[in-house]
Image: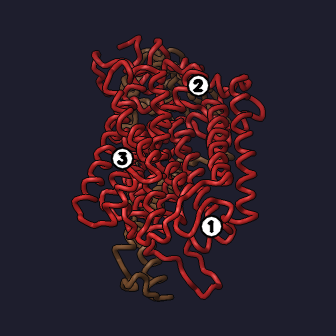
Amino acid sequence: MQVTSPVRTPLITGGKTVHDVTEDVCRQVEGKPSKSWLMAFTVAGGVFIIGLLAVIATLWEGIGMWGLNKTVGWAWDITNFVWWVGIGHAGTLISAVLLLFRQKWRMAINRASEAMTIFAVICAAMFPILHMGRPWLGAYWALPLPNTFGSLWVNFNSPLLWDVFAISTYFSVSLVFWYLGLVPDFATIRDRATGIRRKIYGALSLGWDGAAKTWSRYESVSLILAGLATPLVLSVHTIVSFDFATSVIPGWHTTIFPPYFVAGAIFSGFAMVLTLMLVTRKVFKLEDYITIEHIELMNIIIIVTGSIVGIAYITEFFISWYSGVPAEQYAFFNRMQGPYWMAYWAMMTCNVISPQLFWIKKIRTSIAATFILSIVVNIGMWFERFVIIVTSLHRDYLPSSWVMFYPTIYDIGVYLFTFGLFFSAFLLFAKFFPVINMAEVKSIVKSSSEKTA
Amino acid sequence: MSDSRNFVLGVYDDEDVLLKAVKSVRGAGVKIDEVYTPFPVHGLDEELGYKRSRLPIAAFMFGALGTTLAVIMQVWMLGVDWPMIIGGKNHVAFPDFIPVTFEMTVLLAAFGMVGTFLVASDLKPWKDPKMLDLRITDDKHVMAIDLGKNRGVEADKINSILKDSGAVEVNDKEVED
């Protein structure tokens, strides 16, 4: 048995019982979609369709539709890719790392943030796939498949290939982890439903019966999966950073990249979780489960990771000066003072300065301030990737090839497409799947609800 | 042989009462068929005398298989089948193979363990679990006692043992096999 200190603030407020947890979560799944849900889904679906036009144009005409040129061969697409993968870090971090650290507050938010992870990784994958130009041939370039092109295998020395393995492993392991968590909750919905719904949720629940033997195995599977997922989360963004760090472009080939990227990923991931959870708890009336306490704890993680990112920026700057390499020094000088100075200062303000406001207790426990700052953080993190990628490329070693990158409407359209995809998928998840891990939350009702504490 | 099994179900609404009840029922010499709970109750498997799961061993074996396959695949493809000089490196540039090897290890360990779990616990989409009580997945803990396996103890006595152990309800249930 576990002992919970009476001085701890309760994780669940409102004197909920175990049955209340079932009712509060299942109500969303069983009821008709609300008007606000339908409206949100229409908007997300509309954005998806508009974006799809840009995707179709890109596939039909080729990636010449994008604003890339000979000098800047990577820009908007890879920026979005890294941004989405970064967002996709919070879910598995919350469910795996916080499980290993026995942080019980994760239980109310892990389900939705894992779902967010999965959709974010799907959105991220869109960019490298579209950048292939002919994605239907892409499997031969990305996977070690036997082929008739002269038995050429994929290049295992390339970080881009490591990325394929890292991201597909991360996606599939996160998916399994998420689904396994859903199984007992699907059984709850199954046992309350009749007719076709009972059949569908019955199949999804894999015939779960809640036997102690199964729970015992289930617990050890969860623990091992968490143990496997923890180094996996850290490896994914490390390998994403290798895409840049192993190159010889000034501003890219720095050894600080792996930890700096991982911190940035957790930073942006938590910000996106907050953006989504603040809306979800309001719309689905889950204020007793996702409390101010949860929001405050996530904001503290944002200060920590935001400050790590800030230190990384300063270190990078110092080292570029200290290295004495003119190309390196110029790359950083150009970031601050060059034609993309606005992106640089947007990144500095949004990522380093504004999250420091969370040191003030009033701000980190304010829902409105948290919501605004969480969006600001994600804007900042988008600019961070843009700054790293575009400012390093657009003025490289040869001044005669210096150019500017400007996004075309198709660049923006493909980005919109991923937004539409992400929010449509999240809304469908929130409507048809239990948004809170009922089984886990039920296990802490007694020890950490207001009534008994 | 009969086609149905008769169960006595002790229904509990508190996990701490349940844990004590398992101890007292087993202490009274009654064999518990299985306990069904809406959420994982820590310490229940020990009270029921279940052995520790060997799934971590399965995970390790699958992980080791993943490592081996990844190394063989990369060394064979770039070192034996079609050797090329890439960036002036050796054909088998081993440090470059570490990321893919790591990912394959994690992938096979995770999928192998979860697959083993699903098979061992007989979880599959087309299974009808025949719930003894629909409230198990909501908020009730149910202790199922198979009368066929407890011929030595009278049914009335089992009922009173369950009641004394804190069960809020004691029900009879017949299940077709």
**Which chain letter goes with mark 2?**
A
Mark closest to the chain's N terminus, 2 or 3: 2
Q: What amino acid is labelled 1 in the image?
A: Met
Observer-nearest residue: B42 or A33? A33
Which residue position is annotated with label 2?
A25
Give chain B's shade: brown
Q: Considering the image in quadrants, where does the C terminus of chain A appear?
A: top left
User: Mark 1: few, some, or many residues within 10 Å (few <14, many ≥20)?
Assistant: some
| Secondary structure state at the residue bearing disc 2 | helix
Observer-nearest residue: A123 or A411? A411
Q: Considering the image in quadrants, where does the N terminus of chain A appear?
A: top left
Observer-nearest residue: A98 or A414? A414
Which residue sits at x=59%, y=76%? A145
Which residue position is annotated with label 3?
A263
**Whole-number angstrom distance, CA of label 3 to CA of label 1:** 29 Å
Q: What amino acid is labelled 2 in the image?
A: Val
Give the letter of the red chain. Answer: A
**Which chain letter goes with mark 3?**
A
Q: What amino acid is labelled 3 in the image?
A: Ala
- Residue A190 percent across, percent down from the top left: 66, 32
